[in-house]
Image (cartoon, rainbow, N blue to C red):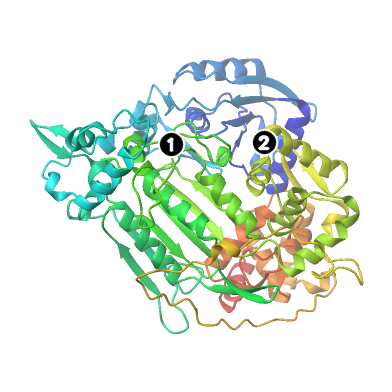
Amino acid sequence: MTPEELDEILHVLREVGEDIANVEVKRAEGGLPKRLWETLSAFANTPGGGTIILGLDEEIGFRVVDVRDPARLQSDLASLCDLMEPPLRPLIQVHTVEGRPVVVAEIPETPHTQKPCHYRGAGLMTGAFIRVADGDRQLTQYEIQVYLDGRGQPTYDLAPVPDKSLSDLDAALLDSFIARLRARPDAPYRDWDRQRLLQVFRILVEHEGRLAPSLAGYLCFGIYPQDTFASLHLSVVRYPTERPGEVSTRGERLLDNVKAEGPLVALLRQGMNAILRNLQRRAIVQGLFRRDVWEYPIEALREALVNALAHRDYSPLARGTPVQVRIFPDRLEVENPGGLFGPVTVERLGEPGLLATRNTHLMRLLEDLPDEDGHVVCENRGTGITAMLEALRAAGMEPPRFDDRRTTFRLTFSNAGLLDDTTLAWLNRFAAYDLNDAQRLALAYLRREGRLTNADYRRLNPGLDSAEVTRQLADLVRRGLLAQHGTRRWTRYTLAGQATSAAPPNGSATSENLAPLPVDRSSQSVELAGESVELAREPVELVEESVELVGESVELVPKSIEHPLSSIELARHVSPERMRATILAQCSIAALTSQELAARLRRDQTYLLNRYLSSLVAEGLLERVGTATTDPHVAYRTTEAGRAWLSEVEARL
């Protein structure tokens, strides 16, 4: 690690006010901290690894403290790394910060073929940890099993279903599958008899001297697989509000609740029908004609469902959990048991040719298993995520958010379009820069999300390779439109210069005089056969609130909150309770956006959103004023419950 990189990390730590996910700070004044092996294990098991800094004190704003013997500390840390299984080989250096020594160790990620890394002195079951937020958590038994499975190729999909036989499989589905196999002109198996094909493709496997369906075979061709595996179904639930469990103004907790059952082809069909029944359709005008399009691109939704059903974990410990689809007013989530498999990480999703399959035999069947339209369920060529990203880009929508929690994988679609009229008008201020479509899309994404990484840019533009992504981002930095923060894996970008102004120049830009990015939604018009689909939702009445913001004078702040606010302005590190109180105090005066709060409190906008604003809304202490959760103009206002909480804590602050 270079001194410049360390300075950047320190800047982020002091700005955020606490440890971050891939950096752990310890005082280490008296030597190597006890149980530091927990952090070593956690970083080794976390994608990208992490960094340990010895000689900083979080309690005093990450200031440098005196470590007695940095060379001894360096040696002891290296010895501790030898006690890990597998042994770790971090880069350990002594740096000078503010005239004092600190020890910095860069912990590499353990290869997936050797995970989970654990402390030999505690054993595998109690000595393996994972990084969660800014802390270390012991792995559960199921998580350990998932890591061990990732070392090789699991064969759970070949497990026999002992009490079933060929008579429990759907003959028509089998006929369609075999006909497709025999239609391949150069296939060596095209002339094989039916029984041989069923065994070669592992639809039937040997079990105690007889043939029984494999798990993969039963899931694909079983007449009713849920008679044996009750939880291997698909759940589709629509909620009336943005939070599960909240009651709507009409007293409803759920607006729809569908349980799709049957073989995988039926789950896919029923799941898509249930989703479409709960989505809006929008009318767009093309020339003289009106065309209806779905709220989310159909291809993206189908790929998400196929991926969840095909790549989920089918091990015994995971068979009690179904694939779940959750539909909210502002987003749609698809979640399956089992995280990403093998070498695949969230950062690499969408890379061309990236392919690692947990259920190889199931995937082989799905390659030739036709759905009701005669198309195969999936291609198994590593193109599903790319197709999803392309469909969202064509619809003018942002990429999905991927969340790998090792035991579950969640994909979230936002229904807020990236290229609304306001954003198109804002983009017009950069007409003189001669930007390409990929760069303009990145600016639109940054305007909404506040920060951008190389992986984000690649997902926005799935046709670009890593080298071209780096070149285009560097071009935006050179033009003064983006600011780069950090290096290597810490690299992120924010808007800079003219791009930091959210409003278009006076008297210019409307969506009529801006040539928009190409948006093609014509392929989304879908007609469902055999089901009556209610497409329209009840209209939501939005209240537009006009807020007049007063200047930043001290008189705005209630006297009981003056001290917390000044502490935040003058100090880098404050307690979470003090920060919460100050946010509530500011939002009790006027509804403020996250950007306005970040400017007032001198904190990173994304950090405020993730650390404080979301939780305050979830607790009912803040409420949103805006059209959607992801809208950059959404403001936050203190609720009556928030004012009551504020009154209670004023005395302590």
Q: Which mark is residue 68?
A: none
Residue 595 vertical position relative to residue 623 in the rendered view, above or below: above
Q: Which mark is residue 341?
A: 1
Nearest the viewer among 129 and 516 is 516
Q: Please state the horizontal and vertical placement of residue 110, each as a whole percent of the image.
A: 50, 25
Q: Mark 1 vs mark 2: give the one in front.
A: 2
Residue at the image position 29 percent from the left and 44 percent from the top: 179
CA distance separating discs 1 and 2:
22 Å
Residue 244 in which image quadrant: bottom left
Residue 601 vertical position relative to residue 355 in the rendered view, above or below: below
Residue 338 in which image quadrant: top left
Residue 170 can be seen, yes or no: no
Position of the N terminus by quadrant = top right
Instruction: Find numbered disc 1 in the image and state the secondary structure of the residue it sits on.
Output: loop
Residue 378 vertical position relative to residue 638 in the rendered view, above or below: above
Residue at the image position 81 percent from the left and 47 percent from the top: 482
The residue singled out by tag 2 in the image is 465
Q: Please state the horizontal and vertical placement of residue 273, each as a whole percent of the image.
A: 40, 66
Instruction: Find numbered disc 2 in the image and state the secondary structure of the residue it sits on.
Output: loop
Crowd tier of the residue under label 2, counting other residues whose Cα lies within 10 Å: few below 14, some 14–19, many 20 or above: few
Q: Please state the horizontal and vertical placement of residue 504, each as a whole percent of the image.
A: 85, 66
Residue 630 vertical position relative to residue 9 in the rendered view, above or below: below
